[in-house]
């Protein structure tokens, strides 16, 4: 790793697995349940959060010495709101259909616990480069889970991936559907995401028992 | 078998061999002499077997009923119905064999496989918990449920509903109802409507849609289905109250024979396996809700134009003999693991199951039957109910204790002193 020191690399890599914001810190669950019925929406949401968190962390980190601590939450909200509006406008301009699918959830990135959490916990106390890596890492960890959940929910719930009918046509009864297979309506509704996330947590902790909380 | 068991003792597959061994033979190990042990023949296996015994008549009836509904839907219901001529026939039973037995086999096969896998991985004994679930599952699904769907649902129900919580005895939700709920939400077109309750109704409808001639459509609307469409006239022309009570009506495989379920319930109460408190209070709960709805109709707060009229005007006591209410109350609500544990809690728990079941039936057009939802909901609340019952008990006893007079043996003056302190 010429570009990154070992410590810097761990800022990006840790949140992908052992310190994942969704499965370990259990943050950002709300949007993971709401928008993962389709893979495409999951990917776009992941990209949006990577942008907001990466840039936001840098901005907050640059301002960290001049923000009065009493009003820091308001300052953070302004930064994140500005970035989210940028994302929303870009989506409306270039991917109108998707922005309609995501609906209010783009705006609700503002309330995503991961973003405020990283601003508070990391960007306020670290330099811009480290904050940038931390932001990207955490957003990637969030995005990875979103994409896994979106993959299974779209595949099992609609029989498609990114809109392509990978399992055959359910109406013309081709592919798997010729054998009597049917789409699982349960995977379309948000509670299914909770169960898929739960299974990911289960698999992750049984592979790495160090992650299991003591109780 | 015994040699195999000894050979694999302490090895990875030991739980599997142990399970087969105890299934086939009486175990030759007994509790060691030291320590305190309550010895009783009334173990988990005995409990489960008793419930299965209570379910076997229902299962047999449902096999005959599968054929009876099928042929009656084609040829019309027989006039001058006679039990032996029209119901207990080989033709009827054959439909039961080819439709109900595969459901049973898949339910047991897949469920026990999952149990075995978990027992081997976690290294504990295979638990008997699935024995009852396995026979309940085929009885609470529509007859034409595809076997692969049932298999998927059983895997889901056993893993997510039970094993993740730690296996038999640790589950929050009734596994059989978790399986049914999964089927209901995952494959709604196979679980509700008027084409799923009678064997072949769906195939016929598909054939007719494709333009086949020479086949008649089969309609197998359930009684609750008719009522939800405000079509009581058509329903009562087709089925009498006696039909509903004996169970000669379409519905999930085993939910119809109220008489046999009642006998099974009495058997379970007599053997002290199931709680009579839950059963009685659930019946009371459903009657109360039914009466309230009847009163609302009698006061003319809803008119016939209302979408709820059919179900609201349905006589309150008839709610008990249609749909899955009786089956749910006797075999599902009384599950000792997921139900309330305290006696007063059982009254509240059962009452709310009956009450909410009838409410969901009447008010939610998407769910013509609400028993499974009501029981799952109350499963979730059972620990809360118990908590407050126990807290209430603790409070009452504390109060009683603080009012009590403590009389020491030695002196009267000390007694008065103590009384003054405690009061």
Image (spheres, rainbow, N blue to C red):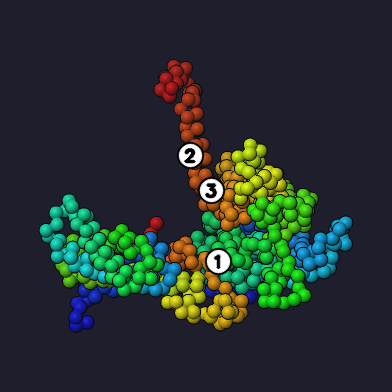
For disc 3, the marked residue is: B382
Both labels 1 and 2 in a single chain: yes
Query: Where is B209 relative to B274, above or below?
Result: below
Camera-side residue: A135 or B366?
B366
Point out residue B294 in the picture as x, y percentages from the top left corner: 66, 41
Tag 3: Cα neighbours inside 10 Å, few (<14), some, or many (≥20)?
many
The residue shown at (27%, 64%) is: A84
Q: CA distance from mark 1 to mark 3?
A: 26 Å
For disc 1, the marked residue is: B186
Query: Where is B156 relative to B327, above or below?
Result: below
Tag 2: Cα neighbours inside 10 Å, few (<14), some, or many (≥20)?
few
Residue B246 is tagged as none
Subunit under mark 2 = B
Residue B391 is tagged as 2
Q: Quadrant of residue B199?
A: bottom right
Marks 3 and 2: in contact by CB < 8 Å? no
Image check: B391 left or right of B92? Answer: left
The disc, 1 or 2, on the residue closer to the chain's N-terminal end is 1
Image check: A72 left or right of B213? Answer: left
């Amino acid at each position: 790793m010429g570009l990154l020191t070992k410590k810097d690399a761990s800022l990006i890599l840790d949140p992908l697995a052992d310190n994942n914001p969704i499965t370990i810190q259990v943050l950002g669950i709300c949007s993971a349940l709401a928008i993962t019925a389709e893979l495409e929406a999951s990917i776009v949401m992941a990209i949006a959060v990577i942008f907001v968190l990466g840039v936001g962390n840098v901005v907050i980190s640059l301002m960290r010495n001049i923000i009065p601590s009493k009003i820091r939450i308001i300052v953070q909200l302004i930064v994140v709101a500005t970035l989210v509006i940028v994302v929303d406008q870009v989506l409306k301009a270039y991917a109108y259909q998707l922005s309609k699918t995501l609906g209010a959830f783009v705006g609700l990135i503002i309330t995503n616990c991961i973003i405020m959490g990283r601003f508070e916990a990391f960007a306020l106390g670290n330099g811009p480069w480290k904050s940038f890596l931390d932001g990207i890492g955490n957003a990637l960890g969030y995005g990875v889970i979103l994409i896994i959940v979106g993959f299974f929910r779209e595949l099992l719930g609609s029989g498609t991936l990114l809109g392509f009918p990978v399992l055959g046509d359910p109406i013309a009864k081709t592919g798997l559907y010729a054998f009597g297979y049917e789409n699982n309506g349960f995977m379309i509704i948000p509670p299914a995401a909770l169960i898929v996330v739960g299974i990911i947590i289960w698999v992750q902790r049984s592979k790495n028992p160090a992650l299991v909380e003591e109780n | 078998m015994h040699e195999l068991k000894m050979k694999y003792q302490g090895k990875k597959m030991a739980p599997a061999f142990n399970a087969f061994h105890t299934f086939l033979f009486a175990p030759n190990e007994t509790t060691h002499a030291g320590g305190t042990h309550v010895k009783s023949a009334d173990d988990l296996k005995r409990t489960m077997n008793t419930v299965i015994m209570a379910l076997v008549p229902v299962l047999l009836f449902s096999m005959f009923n599968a054929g009876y509904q099928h042929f009656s839907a084609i040829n019309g219901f027989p006039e001058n119905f006679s039990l032996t001529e029209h119901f207990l026939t080989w033709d009827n039973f054959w439909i039961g064999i080819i439709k109900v037995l595969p459901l049973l086999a898949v339910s047991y096969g897949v469920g026990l496989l999952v149990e075995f896998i978990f027992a081997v991985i976690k290294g504990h004994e295979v638990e008997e918990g699935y024995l009852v679930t396995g026979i309940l599952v085929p009885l609470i699904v529509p007859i034409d449920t595809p076997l692969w769907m049932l298999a998927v649902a059983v895997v889901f129900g056993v893993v997510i509903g039970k094993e993740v919580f730690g296996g038999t005895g640790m589950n929050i939700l009734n596994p059989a109802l978790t399986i049914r709920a999964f089927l209901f939400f995952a494959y709604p077109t196979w679980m509700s409507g008027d084409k799923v309750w009678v064997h072949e109704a769906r195939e016929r409808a598909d054939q007719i849609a494709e333009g086949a001639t020479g086949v008649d459509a089969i309609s197998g609307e359930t009684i609750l289905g008719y009522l939800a469409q405000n079509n009581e006239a058509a329903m009562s022309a087709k089925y009498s109250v006696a039909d509903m009570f004996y169970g000669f009506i379409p519905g999930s495989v085993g939910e119809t024979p109220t008489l046999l379920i009642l006998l099974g319930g009495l058997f379970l109460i007599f053997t002290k396996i199931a709680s009579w408190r839950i059963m009685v209070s659930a019946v009371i709960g459903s009657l109360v809700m039914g009466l309230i709805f009847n009163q609302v109709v009698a006061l003319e707060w809803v008119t016939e134009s209302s979408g709820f009229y059919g179900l609201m005007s349905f006589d309150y006591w008839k709610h008990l003999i249609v749909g899955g209410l009786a089956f749910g109350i006797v075999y599902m609500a009384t599950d000792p693991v997921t139900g309330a544990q305290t006696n007063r809690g059982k009254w509240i728990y059962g009452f709310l199951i009956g009450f909410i079941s009838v409410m969901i039936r009447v008010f939610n057009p998407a769910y013509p039957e609400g028993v499974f939802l009501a029981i799952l909901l109350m499963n979730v609340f059972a620990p809360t109910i118990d908590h407050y019952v126990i807290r209430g008990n603790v409070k009452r006893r504390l109060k009683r204790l603080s009012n009590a007079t403590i009389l020491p043996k030695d002196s009267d003056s000390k007694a008065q002193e103590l009384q003054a302190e405690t009061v």
